[in-house]
Image (cartoon, grey):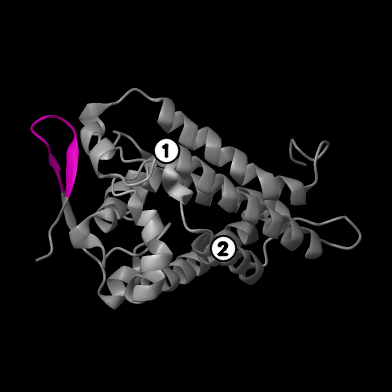
Amino acid sequence: MVFWEEYVSDEVMGTFAPIVVYWIYAGFYHLLPPLDNYRLHTTRDEEKKNLVPFKAVVKGVLLQQLVQAIVALILLTTTANASGVTVQPSMTKQIIQIVIAMFVMDTWQYFVHRYMHQNKFLYRHIHSQHHRLVVPYAIGALYNHPIEGLLLDTVGGAISFLVSGMTARTAVVFFCFAVVKTVDDHCGLWLPGNIFHLFFQNNTAYHDIHHQLQGLKYNYSQPFFPIWDKILGTYMPFNLVKRAEGGFEAKPAKD
């Protein structure tokens, strides 16, 4: 039994918990003081280089989450046990399902993301919206064109859920974790002790390289592992160096 079982169904929890977690975690980063000694870009760069106002970013994220919620609720309710009683598999099986879902999501997002860069029409009219945030920040993690949000995140999530065979309850854990990882990848901070930086090579600095001009056609992998970048030659190694005025800078190490 889980704490929410008395109040809401797993299907409702799986639909809305990732949205709530997104705003709590991204909001936490947004409310932090400047932390100039840990930023990958200066606050001046964020104000100068980003091409979209904060309010437009918030509206864009809310629109994507609305679409995701509709699709998720339909998917989770239509795949639920008709009797209304779902038997959870063993913990070992759930862990395997989550690992499978991570690999499926990484695979889907890598190839769709890469194609959106290679196809000039798709990049110009769709994916470039995300790159208007030249200096990423946490709340903008899901700032995308609605079509990209549907294809990259929503469809990718649905395929991951279906292929892994996980239940709606397991999906709550998986999608909340995926959301936290995605927000962290865009937070723009290199904080000491961050577990995502310790256990994932695909992290904040890794994705920051992709948002830089020279890294635009590299480091497509998201949100978990850099497997496909390394296999297909789109991996750009980087060095994390300290800025004289404080903070860090991710510098490409590839010629």
In space, the residues marked 2 and 1 are separated at their CA atoms by: 22 Å
Q: Which residues are magenta?
A: 240-250
Q: Is the N terminus in the top left, top right, bottom left or bottom right quadrant?
A: top right
Q: Nearest to the eye among marks 2 and 1: give it.
A: 1
Disc 2 residue type? Leu
Pick whichever, 152 or 189, lies toward us: 152
- The reply, left or right, for residue 135 in relation to residue 169 is left
Using the rendered image of the protein, determine whether residue 40 is visible from the camera's viewpoint. no
Please tell me which residue is depicted at 22% across the width and 33% down the height of the picture: 44
Q: Circle 1 is placed at which residue position?
A: 54
Pick whichever, 99 or 7, lies toward us: 7
> For residue 83, which quarter of the picture?
bottom right
Pick whichever, 100 or 159, lies toward us: 159
For the residues labelled 2 and 1, say whether their Cβ atoms are less than 8 Å apart.
no
Disc 1 residue type? Phe
Q: Dot 1: within a 10 Å radius of its alpha carbon, few (fewer than 14), some, or many (20 or more) residues?
A: few
Image x and y of residue 246, in percent: 15, 30
Using the rendered image of the protein, determine whether residue 246 is visible from the camera's viewpoint. yes
Image x and y of residue 97, in percent: 60, 63
Inspect the magenta stretch and tell me whether residue 246 lies in it.
Answer: yes
Please tell me which residue is depicted at 38% across the width and 74% down the height of the picture: 121
Image x and y of residue 244, in percent: 8, 32
Inspect the magenta stretch and tell me whether residue 69 lies in it.
Answer: no
Helix, strand, or loop for circle 2? helix
Q: Circle 2 is placed at which residue position?
A: 150
Image x and y of residue 196, in percent: 38, 45
First in sequence: mark 2 vs mark 1: 1
Helix, strand, or loop for circle 1? helix
- The furthest residue to the top: 33
Q: Dot 2: within a 10 Å radius of its alpha carbon, few (fewer than 14), some, or many (20 or more) residues?
A: some
Pick whichever, 65 or 253, lies toward us: 65
Please tell me which residue is depicted at 45% across the width and 44% down the height of the picture: 57
